[in-house]
Image (cartoon, grey):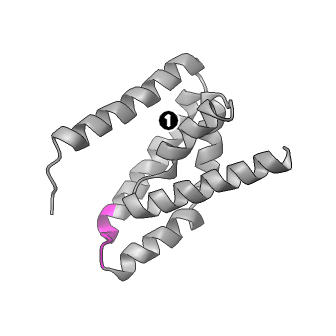
Amino acid sequence: METQQIIYVIAIGIIAGILSGLLGIGGAVLIIPVLVLLLGFSQQMAQGTTLLMMVPPIGALAAWQYYKEGTVDFRVAGLLALGFLVGGYFGGKFANEIPQTILKKLFAILLLVIALKMLFLDKALK
């Protein structure tokens, strides 16, 4: 990897980190499209790379800021983590077994559905 590309990837990480902490979204939503569209990664490579990047210490720093403000529900977070652990294993296995074209479309559809729901059907729980 060339120096310019290393700087570019670090900048992507910084921007994604800021937006993730600001908006409470996972970096994958931001980083995967950039890796695929701008750096030419396969969908599987982008997803695998992003998952490795998000090992717990990364999210912990942003979560700490929310915790200090009293905006973390530990019970829900723990239950989500348990489900995510199991789901992540099977999801990762399945993602590497299906063609990249199908995986890209599934990812795009998920982002679109989430965006439409948030724009038009959002009803906050609290």
Label 1 Cα crowd, 10 Å radius (few <14 / some 14-19 / many 20+): few
Left/right placement of residue 64 relative to residue 99 reads left
Quadrant containing the C terminus in the rendered view: bottom left
Residue 114, horizontal then vertical, whole percent: 31, 38
Q: What element carries label 1?
A: helix
Q: Which residue is at the front of the view, 79 or 71?
A: 71
In this rendering, the answer to whether 1 lies above or below 116 is: below
Left/right placement of residue 43 relative to residue 24 reads right
Say if residue 104 shows up in the picture.
Answer: yes
Residue 93, horizontal then vertical, whole percent: 57, 32
Marker count (numbered)? 1
Quadrant containing the N terminus in the rendered view: top right
Say if residue 98 shows up in the picture.
Answer: no
In this rendering, the answer to whether 4 lies above or below 36 is: below
Residue lying furthest bottom: 68
The residue lying at 60 percent from left, 46 percent from top is: 50
Q: Is 93 part of what is drawn in magenta? A: no
Q: Which residue is at the front of the view, 123 or 38?
A: 38
**What residue span does the magenta drawing correspond to?**
70-76
Residue lying furthest front: 4
Residue 76, horizontal then vertical, whole percent: 30, 62
Disc 1 marks which amino acid? Gly
Residue 103, horizontal then vertical, whole percent: 51, 24
Residue 75: quadrant of the picture:
bottom left
In this rendering, the answer to whether 11 lies above or below 108 is: below
The residue lying at 46 percent from left, 57 percent from top is: 19
The residue lying at 58 percent from left, 67 percent from top is: 57
Reading the image, the residue beneath label 1 is: 91
In this rendering, the answer to whether 9 lies above or below 99 is: below
